[in-house]
Amino acid sequence: MGRALISPAASPPKLRRFFSVTQSYPRQAHQGIAHSLRENVRFSARPALSLQTRAVLSDLPNTRKYPRVGAESTGPVPAAELLGIVELAAKIGAGVVMDAVNKPRNISYKGVTDLVTDTDKMSESVILDVVRKNFKDHLILGEEGGLIGDTASDYLWCIDPLDGTTNFAHCYPSFGVSIGVLFRGRPAAASVVEFVGGPMCWNTRTFTASSGGGAFCNGQKIHVSQTEQVERSLLVTGFGYEHDDAWATNMNLFKYFTDISRGVRRLGAAAVDMSHVALGIVEAYWEYRLKPWDMAAGVLIVEEAGGTVTCMDGGKFSVFDRSVLVSNGIVHEKLLEKIGPATDDLKEKGIDFSQWFKPESYVTDI
């Protein structure tokens, strides 16, 4: 295939003003990409079991109803307009990543193993240019640049300019660019550009969703799988950088579900993992201690593809929470039979599951 045109941490970092990177992506180049993409961008239409016990989960159907995660609307900005800019920004950021994917990396570290590259910063820089050019009054939360703008805005852009940086640094799929926009705290529009292939054959595919408008991959509508049994499911999880009680609990969950399912994968890019649930190629994904920029796009894409989103204790989810479970909906309650009690045990141990990374003055409906 030809080369495509588009081309946390031990402790949460303090939200800080966006800083200028010393080496910026050439303005003429990304403006040219922006013009091209504007001409071609496609708007989308609208009792607890012991962790050590081997067991087959309940075969009872999933009858529980879970609250919607997505916003009721995209607010005063029409869905097509908002989603168009989200997709445009994600593709321009992906252009920076594509230009760098086969080149040497300049790596620095946020922690012992949590790394960042110049590409993360350059991708975020060009994404910010697109957002601020089109929506000057919107609030932005970027993984690298922190909080920018007026907290009185109803809109909050959650930007991960390079989800799966470690994979990118090793030239190992999967990684991507993830952008989700909240309206009054709930996801309204989203795009994830996933890098697929490998060295010397990289390409991309683009996931999009808007609240009430469905989920799409490369413009084609997608839906979660219809698998009814955990024993016939392929599952995905992730592990943070802090090896504490939550990490150990999830390692036990990993072992347990590996034993009773078709397997559990750990790919290392949350937004991509959730997009795979939406695409129907895996049945569920869960993880502790993600950040809003990890989740804002993926949860909406899953929900609009017909899936279910909750916290790992089964509670109502928001992108400011510290755990997430997304699934095809059918196996959700069966997964919670194990994941819920394990998460409750962590709470009893004093592990903090309160909301985090929520801008102090940002008004929400949650």
Image: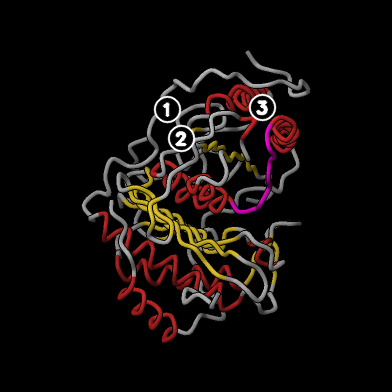
Contact (Cβ within 8 Å) of mark 1 with mark 3: no
**Image side of residue 12 versus residue 188, left or right:** right
Callout 1 secondary element: loop
Quadrant where the C terminus is found in the figure: top left
Callout 2 secondary element: strand
Specify the label residue 66 is tagged with: 1
Q: CA distance from mark 3 to mark 2?
A: 23 Å
Specify the label residue 160 is tagged with: none
- Write down the residue under mark 3: 346
Residue 88 placed where, x, y %? 38, 68
Q: Residues within 10 Å of mark 2 (few under 14, many from 20)?
A: many
Contact (Cβ within 8 Å) of mark 1 with mark 2: yes
Q: Amino acid at mark 2?
A: Thr
- Write down the residue under mark 2: 308
The residue sitting at 57% across, 31% down in the picture is 312
Of the two numbered discs 1 and 3 on the same chain, state the one appearing first in sequence: 1
Of the two numbered discs 1 and 2 on the same chain, state the one appearing first in sequence: 1
The residue sitting at 37% across, 61% down in the picture is 86
Q: CA distance from mark 1 to mark 2?
A: 7 Å
Q: Residue 119 versus residue 251: which sits nearer the camera?
A: 251
Q: Is 246 placed above or below 49 here?
A: below
Q: CA distance from mark 1 to mark 3?
A: 22 Å
Q: Which residues are magenta?
A: 261-269
Q: Amino acid at mark 1?
A: Tyr
Q: Is residue 132 visible?
A: yes
Callout 3 secondary element: helix
Q: Is residue 266 magenta?
A: yes
Res. 119 image quadrant: bottom right
Of the two numbered discs 3 and 2 on the same chain, state the one appearing first in sequence: 2
